Amino acid sequence: MRERFIAFFSGLGHPFTGALIKLGFATRFFLALLRHSPMAFIRFRLTIREIWFAGVLSVLIIAVSGLFIGMVLALQGYDTLVRFGASSSLGILVALSLVRELGPVVGALLFASRAGSAITAEIGLMKAAEQLSAMEMMAVNPMARVIAPRFWGGVISMPLLAAMFSVMGIFGGYLVGVQLLGLDPGNFWSQMQGTVDLRFDVMNGVIKSVFFGIAVSLIAVFEGFDAPPTPEGVSGATTRTVVTSALVILGLDVILTAFMFRGI
Amino acid sequence: MKRGMIDFWVGLFVAAGIAAILFLALRVSSASSLPARSTYTLTANFENIGGLKVRAPVKSAGVVVGRVTSIDLDTQRYVARVTMAMDKHYEFSRDSSAEILTSGILGEQYIGITPGADNKMLAQGSTFKLTSSAIVLEQLISRFLFSKAEDGSSNTEK
Amino acid sequence: MSTPLVQLDQVRFGYGDHDILSDLSLTVQRGQVVAIMGGSGSGKTTLLRLIGGQLRARAGRVLVDGADVGGMNETALYDMRRKLGMLFQFGALFTDLSVFDNVAFPLRERAKLPESIIRDLVLMKLHAVGLRGAANLMPFELSGGMARRVALARAIALDPMLMLYDEPFTGLDPISLATIGQLIRELNDALGAASIVVTHDVAESLSLVDYVYFMADGKVIAQGTPDEVRASDHPFVKQFINGEPDGPLPFHKPAAPYAQELGLEIVRA
């Protein structure tokens, strides 16, 4: 029975079994990471350093991208809304798109390429230079000392970055809508505030970004830890972090949105 | 980078992130759903609810006083039963009426309450006696066309 | 004689179907500096990882200070490693920390000491390797030999009872090489520890160590004191000491016949 079970899976070929083995290893890795996580909070200074690398250094790209996306949304949205005489709803359009979707999703995609890839490369190079091995031999667990702080630094940074992205986007929409296209600012804000719901729009957006933060940070630390200790290995792992993160973010977005959908 | 500088920038970053979330919560959105504890439940039966949806507002004189919490079909009388969570601050007399209205021509539908004159108030769980259904645009148009056609045929008879 | 500090008893280890170590046995006494010699790929580094518990033997026992490393759970393993110091081939310094912080790392992580005592200890360790003046440099500012000495200072930070050296002489100029060799001996005697030096540098290690094991094909094939080794007429030892390219340790990796792989037919007359 056992032989037939194994024979069945090996019959499926290496790409399939390889993926299963990697998934199993990733799960084991995640559990070990959670077990060693208390260290990231007991010695919070370690995590602060990672919030600096993952979060603070990503602020600029997040803020600028958010501003631009908000401006484009306002321009495109105005073009459509004005045909229905509904240009006063521009604030609603900009805010809802950003808070529900673009803030968490585009924020996470940028975060994966800015911070995720850096985390993977750093851990991969530490592994290649035997630094992780050296740490183990000094009786310091790299899971607690290196992996967990980077993971939690990313998880903490992501929702904050997504919120900044949304706010900058709304500000960009305000600049275009009110300052450039001459909409009434009072109408812009009050329509927005009247329609956007705290629980169903803002909170769900924040929840999404927390999930994305967990996913991207886990992929980044895992790929770094799993990277073959060679230059090609590290570069391949960095690419995989960005690609896998993008797919997982978009896939998770579909699932989470389906859960949060409130229409009848 | 000195430790103190990192702490400073991370502190600033976290503060800015929390400020962004607060901005989204306070300036961009409003908590339209009332907290569960300060509400009481009322129901109303309608022959047709049109496009009314769960979480649609309940308004009186234009002020939001509650939310629709559930809509289902009463299978004995085949009418729609709409349940609303009303804000405890607002009470309505027993002869108040509920009707389904539309904001603008194509806007969302909501329940409007017209207060009555009775001294007794609607209590938790009670039902509106007087309701009027949603105006369904198709029915309105077909009724209009029908009456026009009737006019036309009566004219030719003359 | 007291119980040996390290004892390997018929250890077997490998990846997949391929055995790297088969039936390896050796002992290291307290106070000894022992060299493990063998060609590249003969499983010397694997041996150090087995002692450090980073790998587990498939069969046989690895005893450190009387306890079986292979049977330890994670906590026991980390407790055991506190008594070890390991010098990696290229130092493995933490590139984001200064020399001072690198040496302070094990002290800060493993010992609950006030920062002033840590500072004194770090300067003492750096002084022992002659690099007190480099405390504020970053690892990328160091030469290969200096980096190795800093790594050595870091390895001895917690006064280990067993030092493991993975190819400590590779890629060093003769002066740095002699310095490291001298440090290995001095530190061993000062700490009262035992040291295992994995190397293929014959001249330097024979002048330094108390005992030598020769490894090939995952086994110990010869052993003895440096004098015994020099006098040995074991063909492998002679090949190794004299640096002959071919001998019992073949120059060619086993392969199909050369002519056949080149597609030549062997015409027999």
Image (cartoon, rainbow, N blue to C red):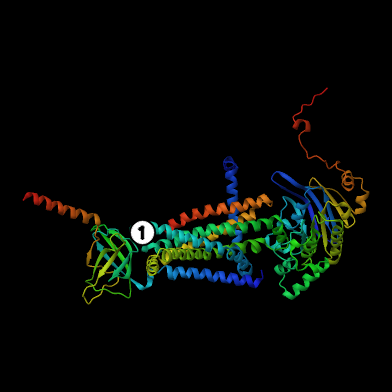
Does residue A2 appear in this view?
A: no
The one nearer the camera, A166 or A31, is A166
Task: Examine the rendered structure and indicate whether residue A37 appears above or below residue C20.
Answer: below
| Chain letter, disc 1 residue | A
In the rendered structure, the answer to whether residue C119 lies left or right of residue B8 reads right
In the rendered structure, the answer to whether residue B64 lies left or right of residue A22 reads left
In the rendered structure, the answer to whether residue A160 lies left or right of residue C22 reads left
Circle 1 packing at 10 Å, graded few (<14), some (14-19), many (20+), is: few
Task: Kindly identify the amino acid type of the residue bearing the numbered disc 1.
Answer: Val
The one nearer the camera, C203 or B151, is B151
- Where is mark 1, residue-wise? A82
Q: Position of residue A124 (x, y in %)?
A: 66, 55
Quarter of the image where the C terminus of chain C is located: top right
Residue furthest out toward the bottom? B119
Task: For mark 1, give the secondary structure.
Answer: helix
Q: Position of residue B130 (x, y in %)?
A: 21, 67
The one nearer the camera, A218 or A139, is A218
Q: How many marks?
A: 1
Residue furthest out toward the left? B158
Q: Position of residue C178 (x, y in %)?
A: 87, 59
Q: Position of residue A197 (x, y in %)?
A: 40, 66
Does residue C187 appear in this view?
A: yes
The one nearer the camera, A138 or B14, is B14
